[in-house]
Amino acid sequence: MRSGAKVAVIGGVFAVVAGGVGYGAYTFLGGESGITATTKSEVRTGPLSAAEIDEAAKGFLTAWADGTDAAEVAQLTNDAVAAGPVISGFREEAHVQDAVITPGPATGTTVPFTVKATVSFKGQSKPWSYESELKVVRGESTGRPLVAWSPSVVHPKLTDNSRLVTGEASNPPIKAVDRSGAELTAEKYPSLAPLLSELRKRYGDKAGGSAGIELVLKGDSGGENGSGSDDGAGDASADAKAGAVADQTLLTLAKGKPGTLETTLDAGVQAAAEKAVKKYSEASAVAVKPSTGEILAVANNRKDGWNAAMLGRQAPGSTMKVMTAALLLEKDLVAADRPAECPKQAMYQGATFQNLDGFDIKGGTFSQSFARSCNTAFIKLIDDTGDDGALAKEAKEVFGIGLNWQTGVPSFDGSVPAGTGSEAAAQYIGQGTVQMNVLNLASVTATAKTGSFKQPVIVSPSLDDREVATASRSLAPGVTDQLRSMMRLTATSGTGAKAMSGLGGDKGAKTGSAEVDGQETSNSWFTGYEDDLAAAAVVQSGGHGGDAAGPLVAAVLGAE
């Protein structure tokens, strides 16, 4: 590939130019994918040569650019069936015209390129430019050099579950504001990009604006990320099941009129959460107001732009012990100041459980076991509950887990299924089949702080008359007091003390480390509160909860 080469459209027809010299488009005949170069060569194996990479990249860009039928262009990739509709959609749905494609020098088998084009729709036109890249591979059957197909070749944000569409916007734009009226933008708060898109999708027509004409990256159903229930639907919607990224505007051809949408977010807390999650490559954090359930901040640091803070599903580790402790306290099997066994190991239903580094506590109280996150102290009491489904009932009836939350945007509301045998033991310490995200965990902490579940919301339910979830019962005042005292001990002298040391208000915390298959290091979980602010965070492969997620939560709690 010559670094000065360009693929330019002239009068509606694309041509390749390099250093001012014109090259005609390639002629193609039958071959491995239905097309091959006119000069047939022997089947090759082994690493690709620079000439082969140049040939494949230039051939694909030329055919894509010069208006060749999309099905034929797709034959120059290693997955013609998948490539054809995407290439066709670039022209017919995205309405891209007058493009100039400038390839850069290859790095190995990867060839970067820049696209400068015009998008036109119903008399409205706007220039559009972006960078992408392609990779060349050797065909498995004939050995021909082919473009390795991925939708990101056409545009870097395209996936198997999205497409480019230009037209009148489905929803008017919004001006989202926080609880004090400060504007919230994706430029200032990058984590909010998928949430703002979802809020526009749901409430744009209720905020009083008018739609414009836009080029949109439109999400479809499907994908790999798990999620949960999409509020407003009894079961999870397709978008929520997929964890699909909300529609994203890439180019505005004609501006619409934005309507103002009030949210429960707090710009100051959001800014702190944004800054905190940037310390790790895979981290999420949420803050809520315990007295009301209002969501004050949602932050993610992820390459895929997915709102894992509200849609994620992972085992929360020992942070689950907040709910487990509440269950044991309600059944009067423990008390904060009563002695509790904490041996190095405990056997349950044929499975052996131990504490971190094999520690034990001799003659300690249940508060001390909670503060040091003693696994065995909890597991030894499972049979005494007299009900294999006791923890599942506690999670739902008191903490609102699994009640189809109506937050205002898609969210997973947690899952604690009834467990039996060793699976039940794993659940008591936040492993096994328990599934949570940091929104769920912040809510659990808020419930522990106040004694009553307040379903998290990000916009007022009065905006669309949705019915929020309500728990069937609250914690008894005596149980709430003991739970708070144990969380306070954790924050002052237990596993959360180092992270929470800079906070001086009424505070509490719980740490957690969750083992994940395929990871050498556990996920780091932490949840805590200070006064009327509760927050939770998770860091992928972050290790112990107090080491990575703990400082994130402390930074968010310290924002108010």
Image (cartoon, helix red, strand yellow):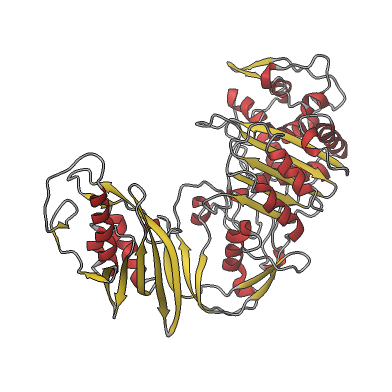
Residue at 73% x, 36% y is 323
Question: 365 or 25, which lies in front?
Answer: 25
On screen, residue 21 versus residue 283, left or right, reads left
| One can see residue 385 in this view | yes
The image quadrant of residue 351 is top right
On screen, residue 179 versus residue 113, left or right, reads right
Above or below — where is 257 with respect to 19? below
Residue 422: percent from left, percent from top: 59, 23
Q: Residue furthest bottom?
A: 123
| One can see residue 389 in this view | no
Residue 119: percent from left, percent from top: 41, 75
The image quadrant of residue 355 is top right
The image quadrant of residue 370 is top right
Question: 275 or 179, which lies in front?
Answer: 275
Residue 151: percent from left, percent from top: 38, 57
Residue 132: percent from left, percent from top: 41, 59
Question: 546 or 476, which lies in front?
Answer: 546
Residue at 80% x, 14% y is 362
Above or below — where is 342 with respect to 336? above
On screen, residue 227 versus residue 105, left or right, reads right
Residue at 31% x, 74% y is 9
Residue at 61% x, 57% y is 231
Question: 2 or 543, which lies in front?
Answer: 2
On screen, residue 500 versus residue 518, left or right, reads right
